[in-house]
Image (cartoon, rainbow, N blue to C red):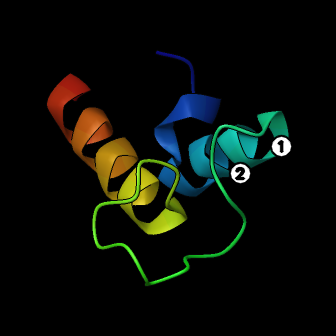
Amino acid sequence: MSKKDADPKAVVRKLVKTGKVKKKCCRSKPRCKRCPVIALQKAKADIRKAA
């Protein structure tokens, strides 16, 4: 894991740029697969797991 990947916000920003994650949370569907809030939680969990 590189030093750039250690920042969860940077990981989510990269996913937004590639189009895999939406820019804003729509809040209409609680478990939206493209939600940036859920993506941030997953990124934080992955980084904690890798550390």
Instruction: Pick the residue in front: 1 or 30.
Output: 30
Query: Measured along the vertical axis of the image, is residue 12 above or below residue 27?
Result: above
Query: Would you name the residue on which mark 1 appears?
Result: 17
Q: Residue at x 53, y 62 (%)?
A: 36
Task: Specify the amino acid type for callout 2.
Answer: Arg
In which quadrant will I find the C terminus?
A: top left
Residue at the limit of the structure toward the left, as seen here:
49
Helix, strand or loop at label 1? It is helix
Residue 29: name its quadrant. Answer: bottom left
Residue 23: where, in percent of width, then height? 72, 66
Task: Specify the amino acid type for callout 1.
Answer: Lys
Residue at the limit of the structure toward the top, as seen here:
1
31 with respect to 49 (left or right): right
C-alpha gap between disc 2 and disc 1: 6 Å
Q: Answer few, some or many: residues within 10 Å of disc 1's Cα (few below 14, many 20 plus, some between 14 and 19).
A: few
Q: Residue at x 23, y 24 (%)?
A: 50
Whether pointer 2 and pointer 1 mark residues with C-beta atoms closer than 8 Å, the reply is: yes
Residue 6: where, in percent of width, then height? 48, 38
Query: Measured along the vertical axis of the image, is residue 8 above or below residue 15?
Result: below
Q: Residue at x 29, y 73 (%)?
A: 30
Q: Answer few, some or many: residues within 10 Å of disc 2's Cα (few below 14, many 20 plus, some between 14 and 19).
A: some
Query: Measured along the vertical axis of the image, is residue 37 above or below residue 45?
Result: below
Q: Nearer the viewer, mark 2 or mark 1?
A: 1
Query: Would you name the residue on which mark 2 appears?
Result: 13
Residue at the limit of the structure toward the bottom, as seen here:
27
Instruction: Pick the residue in front: 31 or 9.
Output: 31
